[in-house]
């Protein structure tokens, strides 16, 4: 099945990625469908849509006089809407890297709840890309249609300090440029 990287009609399409079924939430980036904090400013257009499937690592650390699972970093494969691998997402720092060698980092601008058991939706302002390719000209990245990825429910206490837990997650990453 071949799908464009451009916005699609509002629908959900299933794509099989190495044994995982990935729900593609087409047109999920439409302004009316999103909470205000994670909307991209007017004057921008979608230049790339990807599905990220991977893992988030958390570490048990002392925090505010107690212990908590703290985000340590992501590792995900980025695939186009047609299921073809086009890059990866990793960090820290949060880095989106296309297989063509172009890459960018960014600064979180806002988050919005995505439902129980899911990491929040996110809006990131992109730093200028390095290398030439897919990431050139990107100004914003949205993380949408998230599934999973929240901190582990297992206890985190002084006896577990320094231990790491890895959780699976999935999200749509939508890349925007000035229109």
Image: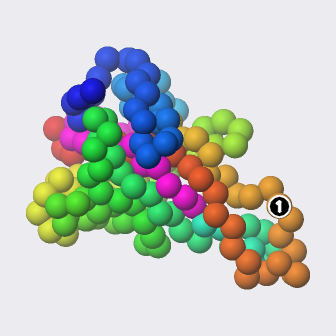
Residue 96 occupies quadrant: bottom left
Whether residue 30 is visible to the viewer of this picture, yes or no, is no
Toward the viewer: 128 or 95?
Answer: 95
Q: Residue furthest left?
A: 132
Q: Quadrant of the C terminus?
A: top left
Q: Is residue 104 above or below residue 138?
A: below
Residue under the image location 25 percent in, 59 percent down: 98
Q: Main secondary structure of the magenta part?
A: strand
Residue under the image location 21 percent in, 56 percent down: 135
Toward the viewer: 22 or 66?
Answer: 22
Q: Is residue 5 above or below residue 97?
A: above
Whether residue 53 is visible to the viewer of this picture, yes or no, is yes
Residue 114 located left or right of residue 12: right
Question: Percent position (x, y) of residue 132?
Answer: 11, 63
Q: Is residue 46 above or below residue 133?
A: above
Residue under the image location 69 percent in, 67 percent down: 165
Q: Quadrant of the N terminus?
A: top left
Question: Percent position (x, y) of residue 40?
Answer: 36, 40
Is residue 91 a member of the stretch shown in magenta?
Answer: no
Mark 1 lies on a secondary structure that is: loop
The residue under label 1 is 154
The number of discs equals 1
User: Magenta region: which residues?
Assistant: 39-56
Question: Percent position (x, y) of residue 143?
Answer: 45, 45
């Amino acid at each position: 099945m071949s799908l464009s990287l451009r916005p699609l009609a509002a629908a959900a399409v299933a794509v099989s990625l190495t044994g995982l079924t990935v729900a593609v939430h087409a047109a999920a980036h439409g302004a009316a469908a999103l909470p205000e904090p994670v909307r991209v400013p007017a004057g921008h257009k979608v230049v790339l849509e990807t599905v990220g499937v991977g893992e988030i690592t958390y570490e048990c650390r002392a925090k505010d006089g107690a212990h908590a699972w703290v985000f340590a970093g992501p590792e995900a494969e980025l695939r186009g809407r047609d299921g073809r691998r086009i890059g990866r997402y990793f960090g820290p720092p949060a880095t989106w890297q296309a297989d063509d060698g172009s890459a960018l980092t960014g600064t979180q601008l806002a988050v919005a709840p995505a439902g129980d058991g899911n990491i929040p939706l996110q809006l990131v302002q992109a730093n200028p890309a390095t290398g030439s390719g897919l990431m050139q000209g990107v100004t914003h990245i949205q993380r949408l249609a998230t599934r999973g990825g929240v901190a582990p429910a297992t206890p985190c206490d002084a006896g577990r300090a320094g231990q790491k837990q890895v959780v699976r997650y999935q999200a749509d990453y939508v890349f925007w440029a000035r229109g």
